[in-house]
Image (cartoon, helix red, strand yellow):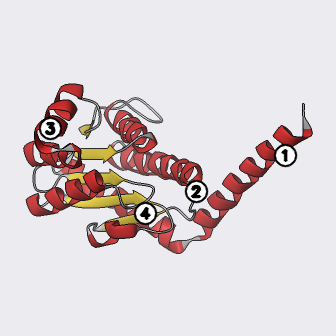
Amino acid sequence: MDREPTQFIVAELEESLAATAAAARSSAFVGQIAAISAAMVAALRQGRKILLAGNGGSAADAQHIACEIVSRLNYDRAALPALALTTDTSILTAVGNDYGFEQIFARQVAGLGQAGDVFVGISTSGRSPNVLAALAAANAKGLRTVGFTGARDGAMADCCEFMLNAPSDRTPVIQQLHITAAHIICGVVESALFPKG
């Protein structure tokens, strides 16, 4: 293998490891994972649901997290209610056409969200207009609001009850930490609601 690709690969892996280590050492990051997990457990115990949204890779993360909640993560158990607002092409195109792209998630929050639900907005920049609009809609309806972003939280900090700031400014690394944190959250939720043994 060429030396140059090998150096790139090793550098990427080392950056990922360093960011994960920084997250593990951060009491704020660990504390927010715990707080988000507790909020989701409380909502689900009350018969509420989890709504998630993001763009691009964050849209895929929203779907991934919803999948882990509805299906299972570590072991068989009853299904839980979660919905990624990134998947219905008819809604996305109708709302985008009729109200504008910035409203594609907010309109769904307005139609599907109920007070006590949890809305998770994922934006690596913290500045995605459609995620910010959805957070505003969620706050207006009395949903609990969670933001997943990077080291710089942009405008999201003012819109969220809970903020998970991945300690990186690089989108790929932020996304790696988001899905790692999400797996931990889903594991905490699963074990709290369906304790084994």
Element at label 1: helix
Q: Which residue is mark 1?
A: 7
On the image, the x and y values in percent for residue 32 come to 42, 66
| Disc 2 and disc 4 in contact, CB within 8 angstroms | no
| Disc 3 and disc 2 in contact, CB within 8 angstroms | no
Q: Residue at 28% x, 68% y: name it.
A: 161
Q: CA distance from mark 3 to mark 4?
A: 28 Å
Tag on residue 164?
4
How many residues crowd mark 2 within 10 Å: few (<14), some (14–19), many (20+)?
some
Who is closer to the viewer here, 142 or 53? Answer: 53
User: Where's the N terminus, which quadrant?
Assistant: top right
Q: Compared to 67, does 147 lie above or below?
A: below
Who is closer to the viewer here, 118 or 2? Answer: 2
User: Where's the C terminus, which quadrant?
Assistant: top left
In this rendering, would 39 be left or right of 112?
right
Amino acid type at mark 3: Val
Q: CA distance from mark 4 to mark 1?
A: 31 Å
Element at label 3: helix
Tag on residue 95?
3
Amino acid type at mark 2: Arg
Q: Compared to 179, does 33 lie above or below?
A: below
